[in-house]
Amino acid sequence: NDPENPGSQIIYIVGYNRVMALRPDGSVIWSKATGLELTATEAESGPARNFQSLNYHPATDSLVSVTTGGALFAFSRKTGELIAPVGQIPGAPAISEKGTRIPKLVLKRVDPLMDKAFGKTVAGQSLFSTVANYIYGGGGIVTNYFSIDPGSSRIYMAATAPDAEDGTEDGRSEIGAIYALDLVDDANGGLAFRVLDRKTFKGGTGSTPALSADGQRVYVSDNEGHVIALDSELQEMWRVDVAEPLVGSITVAADNNELYAVTQNDVIQIIDKGDHGIRTWTAELTGFDGYANVDRQSNALTATVTANGVVIMIGGGKSLLGRTLMLH
């Protein structure tokens, strides 16, 4: 909602070269060049330059964004100008043996078909492989959206840990981290990104940190199959083992301390009891029972809490090397 014009709305979008503010009818309020230009090396890095959309930072009336390579940006909401130097999440590109991957035999069949239909990327890569790698977090530092507490304006990002913290300095990170950041006074009358707290954990994450309504709890999942509850200072309060990695971010209900964790096969309700969490019920997927050509059902997206239920998206299809090839 446009604060200067009640009843009007603004859509903000960002790309590598440009950030824009638009009306819903498509008219442009402002359009600014980010000042970024790709070098040949950066063009070859593929998705590492992509932005994870924009989020609102109330304390500075700014629009914050991060690239999958961990570069941090803050734009003025009113003008689109950069209001702080570009920051950097201190993680290293992710590498994990437990993350979801598209089988190589599928890539070998699909890439030539996509190349024929759409051509290759600017960097000469096959479109399907590039997008699949981006979706599943390969080589990224930040691989999902991020959260900002509207009360404190503290920024929470799930990312990777710095290179050496996994025990090997090889330019890659095998462990995850969650960062608490803010835009703070740089002592020279300007603003700068600053990491306030950091919590590392075994098993990376592709989930967006989910906040409780009061901003006192931060929830994240890892690739080991845990739902982890942290306080606002990123001290771990508890963790619950749900046996397999989540396929979406954790959903937090506005009341009753209810959380919903969506794995490939189940929807699990967890209640935050303060110093521990408990699983209360598990819902199995049966939406495609009886459908032709469906021998496996799988969750496809983060759950959504409504006034009297929980909405999920299910895919039905065939099993292919342990994964669901969604046909419905």
Image: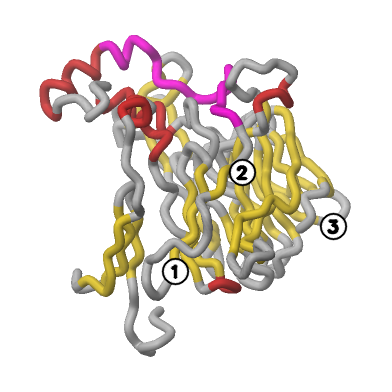
Secondary structure mainly formed by the magenta segment: loop
Crowd class of label 1 (few under 14; some 14 to 19; many from 20; radius 10 Å)? some
Q: Are marks 2 and 1 in contact (CB under 8 Å)?
A: no
Reading the chain from its start, which is encountered first: label 1 or label 3?
A: 1
Give the residue drawn at x 22%, y 71%.
Answer: 28
Range shown magenta = 92-108
Residue position for label 1: 76
Q: Residues within 10 Å of mark 2 (few under 14, many from 20)?
A: many
Residue 132 image position (x, y, % from top left): 37, 28
- Quadrant placement of the C terminus: top left
- In this rendering, the answer to whether 24 lies above or below 202 is below
Q: Secondary structure at mark 1?
A: strand
Image quadrant holding the N terminus, namely bottom left
Using the image, tell me which numbered label, if any, was put on residue 192.
none
Mark on residue 158?
Answer: 2
Mark 3 lies on residue: 274
Q: Nearer the viewer, mark 2 or mark 1?
A: 1
Observer-side mark, 1 or 3, equals: 1
